[in-house]
Image (tube, rainbow, N blue to C red):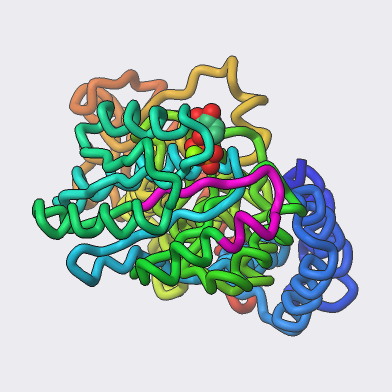
């Protein structure tokens, strides 16, 4: 598991204020290995890590993050960028919009045609028509009809006609005459790239001039996917890629390789056999999947968002002046809470959810603490020293807690204030680390 390996590599990075050539090498070696594990082409993986290294070296680590965490974020950002940055949509211009499916047999063209029709019908308010141009297997026409029935979309087919160009052209006429505004043309594939298939799809493509030509590829085919994508792109100059069968444990390295080789956006992913199992492609999520790092990045990002440096500086001043009180404590708790509930947070730490699976985590672990603080007067909050036994009893009663719980919180607060004073070094990095980590 990459996360574990990175954890180890990060160990070396810990405590350094700058990312340097030496401390970055081990981590990037693990990243490269992770990419290869995910079936990313060797040269692409190598170029990628070299590029990240150049960007990373010399960066200051001023945030709540450890250098290792910052590096993970750099790696992820770079990977996201490589896979297309922003989300790419389908071009729905033209009336009707003509969409042509291409790809090998078994890649998921027929299934995806149905999913896309269903998506456009339910999410984009379109009236799609499905067209059966796979004329080689009678079962193929039937399969598309079954799919169409399932989603309530009409299927155009000519079982006796053996000319897919004609069928596609007739279908478009039919669509125009009957108010369909999207025409999705499902085609025949072969098990491997061959001349006949390529000639045929090229002829259909030329005849119907689709607004969108989509290349459908099974994400489990790994390295082969790159060659297939290149062959289809050379003939069709397609507009986008559909990555199917991403519901298994495939890491989807094909996404990165294909994008690097043909430089076309990945538009959708298929995540199951059902008609609803379609997702817009999010480069960022894919980057996380390829790196196999769970949600560790979103955890890092949320920490980055929540603990901004301005807040930290303000807090530091208060500590220096001995003004840190329960109101500040409350603010800290609320910051932590903004990051999500404890269960979510634990779930995002790689390995932790497994280790903690038998431990009961309170949904709101801070409930009592907050109640106690809310039951304090403003004076008590800013000068906790005045809280004597009598006041404690009142606070416990007001917050519905026991006096031991109030005592415990007072003790925690005391320790925290002391620690904060102690850890306050120049620049305040230590404090931030403590608050963030
Ligand atoms: P085609 O030959 O390109 O038209 O491929 P099909 O659409 O017939 O799909 C081939 C097989 O893959 C079928 O059994 C589908 O149910 C299955 N399939 C297609 N897309 C997905 C997907 O996203 N996830 C899973 N698990 N199976 C899929
Ligand atoms: Mg098919």
Kindly identify the residue that appears in the image at 52 percent across and 66 percent down: 202
Q: Is residue 197 magenta?
A: yes
Tell me if residue 285 can be seen.
Answer: no
Quarter of image, res 431: bottom right
| Bounds of the magenta segment | 185-199
* Residue 262 horizontal side relative to residue 157, left or right: right
Kindly identify the residue that appears in the image at 44 percent across and 62 percent down: 204
Q: Give the tally of numbered discs.
A: 0
The picture places residue 264, in percent across and down from the top left corner, at: 54, 71
Quarter of image, res 31: bottom right
Q: Is residue 192 magenta?
A: yes
Q: Quadrant of the N terminus?
A: top right
The picture places residue 414, in percent across and down from the top left corner, at: 49, 45
The picture places residue 126, in percent across and down from the top left corner, at: 16, 52
Q: As rendered, which of 264 and 317 lies closer to the eye?
A: 264
Q: As rendered, which of 12 and 187 lies closer to the eye?
A: 187
Give the answer, above or below, for where 393 lies relative to 131. Answer: above
Tell me if residue 261 can be seen.
Answer: yes
Give the answer, above or below, for where 195 lies relative to 52. Answer: above
Kindly identify the residue that appears in the image at 33 percent across and 41 percent down: 158
Kindly identify the residue that appears in the image at 30 percent across and 30 percent down: 392
Q: As rendered, which of 393 and 120 lies closer to the eye?
A: 120
Q: As rendered, which of 228 and 121 lies closer to the eye?
A: 228
Extreme top residue here?
Answer: 358
* Residue 382 horizontal side relative to residue 95, left or right: right
Give the answer, above or below, for where 309 lies relative to 344. Answer: below
The picture places residue 393, in percent across and down from the top left corner, at: 27, 24
């Amino acid at each position: 598991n990459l996360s574990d390996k990175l954890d180890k590599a990060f160990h070396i990075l810990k405590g350094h204020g700058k990312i340097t050539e030496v401390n970055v090498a081990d981590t990037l070696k693990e990243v490269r290995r992770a990419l290869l594990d995910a079936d990313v082409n060797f040269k692409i993986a190598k170029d990628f890590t070299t590029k990240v290294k150049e960007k990373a070296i010399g960066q200051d680590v001023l945030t709540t993050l450890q250098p290792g965490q910052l590096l993970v974020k750099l790696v992820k950002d770079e990977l996201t960028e490589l896979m297309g940055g922003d989300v790419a949509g389908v071009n729905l211009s033209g009336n009707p919009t003509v969409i042509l499916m291409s790809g090998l047999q078994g890649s998921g063209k027929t299934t995806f045609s149905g999913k896309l029709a269903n998506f456009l019908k339910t999410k984009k308010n379109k009236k799609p028509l499905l067209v059966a141009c796979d004329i080689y297997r009678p079962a193929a026409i039937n399969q598309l009809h079954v799919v169409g029935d399932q989603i309530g979309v009409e299927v155009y087919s000519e079982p006796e006609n053996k000319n897919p160009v004609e069928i596609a052209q007739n279908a478009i006429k039919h669509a125009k005459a009957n108010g369909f505004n999207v025409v999705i043309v499902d085609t025949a594939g072969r098990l491997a790239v061959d001349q006949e298939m390529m000639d045929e799809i090229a002829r259909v493509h030329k005849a119907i001039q689709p607004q969108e030509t989509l290349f459908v590829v099974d994400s489990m085919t790994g390295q082969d996917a790159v060659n297939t994508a290149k062959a289809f792109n050379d003939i069709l100059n397609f507009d986008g890629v559909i990555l199917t069968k991403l519901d298994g444990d495939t890491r989807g390295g094909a996404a990165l390789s294909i994008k690097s080789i043909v430089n076309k956006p990945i538009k959708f992913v298929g995540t199951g056999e059902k008609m609803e199992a379609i997702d817009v492609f999010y480069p960022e999520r894919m980057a996380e999947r390829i790196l196999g790092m769970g949600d560790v990045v979103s955890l890092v990002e949320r920490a980055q968002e929540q603990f901004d440096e301005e807040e930290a500086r303000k807090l530091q001043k208060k500590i220096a002046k001995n003004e840190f009180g329960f109101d500040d404590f409350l603010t800290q708790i609320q910051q932590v809470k903004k990051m999500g509930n404890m269960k979510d947070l634990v779930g995002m730490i790689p390995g932790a959810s497994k280790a903690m699976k038998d431990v009961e985590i309170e949904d709101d672990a801070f409930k009592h603490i907050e109640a106690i603080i809310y039951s304090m007067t403003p004076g008590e909050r800013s000068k906790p020293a005045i809280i004597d036994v009598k006041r404690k009893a009142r606070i416990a009663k007001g917050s519905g807690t026991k006096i031991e719980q109030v005592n415990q919180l007072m003790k925690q607060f005391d320790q925290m204030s002391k620690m904060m004073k102690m850890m306050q070094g120049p620049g305040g990095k230590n404090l931030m680390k403590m608050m963030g980590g």
